[in-house]
Amino acid sequence: MDELPSIDQWLVTPENPPRSVVGLDHERCAALHNYLIQYAWASSNRDLGSLETQSWFEKYGEEANNIREHLNPTLINFLEAAYDCGGGVVSLFYWVSGFNPPDWLWKNWEGVAEDGEEHRRLTLYNTHTGLLGGHVDGLCYDQKTSKAIMFISTDDHDFASGEDGAHLWQPLETVLSKWIMTLRKGKITAGPDGISLNNEKFGPWLYHSYSAQQVEDTVAAFNRLVIAIESRIPAARRRWPTTIPILSDRILDSASISNPSFARSFLRSIRLPSFKFIAPGLMVPTPETFVASQLFTPIRDEDDLLTIPPVLLFRANETFKFDHDDKCGQRNPYSFIYTTALQHTPIPAGVYTDAISRRSEDTAEEGFRFILPYTIGENEFARKSTGQLIDEGNFKDLYQHGFKPFGGDWSRAQRLVKLLDNWTSMVERGLWAVGEDGVMGGIEKFKEADTKTHWKDYWIEPDW
């Protein structure tokens, strides 16, 4: 693959935030947009020197020039500098194929825009139709606020409307940077014809159920949490830490942990801490208890042999049961194959990996579900990342995304690394007390997520 230009100076990071400019930062956005095109082109085994670099205005000519009056000057600058997807040979990214033609920019906003603002919001990039079929939308841009958001479907508009949804709109350079970060993490990559995974490929773009870098990042987050806890255990009660892995391959085989899988790689890589509780009421797995705790892993979907069952990572002493009145599968954390198999079984509460099929798009083996032994939402304070209230009677959505403003299906699970980072913050800020057995307080502590004072402590800000 040809060497790609360095993009580091343009990426939005905590150390390199969006610049203070009037309108769209067209220079930065064009550099990021063009990098994605160059990445897709080079990953398809094409010579970068052969990349067609015509702009949107060059491609659509008079049709594009006729609508200049409806476009902000800085958006025009961007459309004059950004490549139009290599002449249509490659697509811009996994979720979007590329720029919309002039007659489609406002198509999905007809009848929605307020009087006098018919051209304020437009759909700049269109969603890959294979992701959804009908009702597709794409990356939308607000010319008044110079902010962008990714709507896979037009049905998602309500998630980011009005003042309550204003915080979900981000500078375009932030969205493009998030997309490039998924490449660096190995979650999304591109490859030439003939290279594919078990799920659908969109242009050259491949969506991995997890990556080696994600395992490494999650192990590092676990280690940071362990260090934060161990350093706060009273010195007289502190035990020497060990370098011994928590679980051996023999134990993981006995527990029917898929091989290879994110859960197996993570559990095989973390060391056994010198304490018992990793969070309030949640225990670190041990060789003695791990196998007996895994109720989901022996269950196989004979209709989909690429299914990866949930793995219990951090167990509570309390249990839960599936909601058997949940006819639509909305309230239970996992699908009917699991609810049927375990319909009368008390199941350990705690943090599980998500159940996914590698045949599906937009999945997260690196994701988690925190299953509580009680419900939250009754107090109307617990929220998903979007700011949307968690429904009353919910026991599965604490810390979850909900709608994803950077792209992706609303049901994809939150990444485990984000949960571990949140817990580290809780320990370091003194919001969770630490004793000789680790983090103190029972599982009831998480009820703070549904209180006016503490809901934001149990909330993870929107990300990809």
Image (cartoon, rainbow, N blue to C red):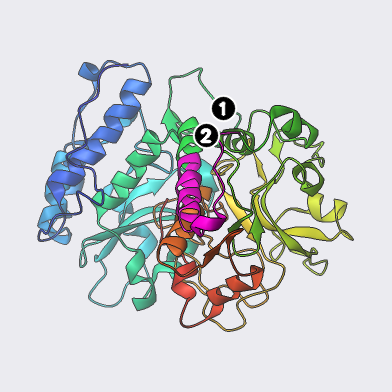
Crowd rating for badge 2 (residues with CA inside 10 Å; few <14, some 14–19, many 20+):
many
Image quadrant assignment for residue 93: top left
The answer to whether marks 1 and 2 mark residues whose Cβ atoms lie closer than 8 Å is yes
In the image, 101 versus 386, the foreground residue is 386
In the image, 444 versus 167, the foreground residue is 444
Give the extent of the magenta segment. Answer: 218-244
Q: Which mark is residue 208?
A: 2
Name the amino acid type tagged 1: Leu
Q: Which residue sits at x=77%, y=35%?
A: 256
Q: Does the magenta stretch include residue 232?
A: yes
Crowd rating for badge 1 (residues with CA inside 10 Å; few <14, some 14–19, many 20+):
few
Quarter placement of the N terminus? top left
Q: Residue 51 carries which label?
A: none
x then y, percent, for residue 198: 61, 29
Q: Is residue 314 magenta?
A: no
In 3D space, how far apart are the residues under numbered discs 1 and 2 (Cα atoms)?
8 Å
- Tag 2 secondary structure: loop
Q: Which residue sits at x=48%, y=38%?
A: 214
x then y, percent, for residue 397: 60, 64
- Tag 1 secondary structure: loop
Regarding residue 305, the answer to whether it shows in the image is: no
Q: Mark 1 points at which residue?
A: 197
x then y, percent, for residue 270: 56, 38
User: In terms of sequence position, does the residue under pointer 1 or pointer 2 come before the other?
Assistant: 1
x then y, percent, for residue 323: 79, 67
Q: Which residue sits at x=19%, y=54%?
A: 18
Left or right of residue 343: residue 368: left
